Image (cartoon, grey):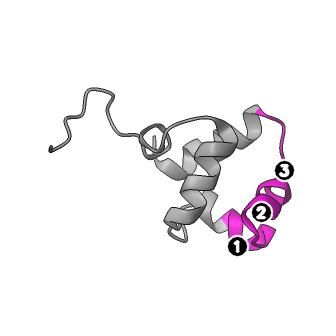
Amino acid sequence: MEYYERLRNLREDRDLLQQDIADLLGTTQTYYSKYERGKHPLPIEHLIKLCKFYGVSADYILGLPKNMEYPE
């Protein structure tokens, strides 16, 4: 699943409108809809806000594996 599909699923699972999330991010509904369709890259600032709002990790939204190793 692509990150933009996860964005849509997270929003829809909470019965929120695109406008609700656009307001949270300080953008327009039209612009936010481009994130959910994968037509525009999601800025890191918006990723951070969405992680905090939904209570999920960036790894989850980005679809990274749970057992991913990180350099020290």
Under tag 2, what secondary structure? helix
The residue mark sitting in front, 2 or 1, is: 2
| Front residue of 49 and 20 | 49
Name the residue beneath numbered marker 2: 22
Residues under numbered marks 2 and 1 in contact, where contact means CB atoms less than 8 Å apart: yes
Residue 11, quarter of picture: top right
Q: Position of residue 1 (x, y in %)?
A: 45, 40
The residue mark sitting in front, 2 or 3, is: 2
Mark 2–mark 1 distance (CA, rounded to whole Å):
8 Å
- Against 66, is 53 above or below? below
Residues under numbered marks 1 and 3 in contact, where contact means CB atoms less than 8 Å apart: no
Does the segment drawn in magenta span residue 34? no
Q: Residues within 10 Å of mark 3 (few under 14, many from 20)?
A: few
| Front residue of 36 and 26 | 26
Task: Provide the residue span drawn in magenta.
Answer: 14-33
| Front residue of 39 and 69 | 69
Q: Main secondary structure of the magenta part?
A: helix
Under tag 1, what secondary structure? helix
In primary-sequence order, the first of circles 2 and 3 is 3
Residue 51, quarter of picture: top right
Name the residue beneath numbered marker 3: 17
Name the residue beneath numbered marker 1: 31
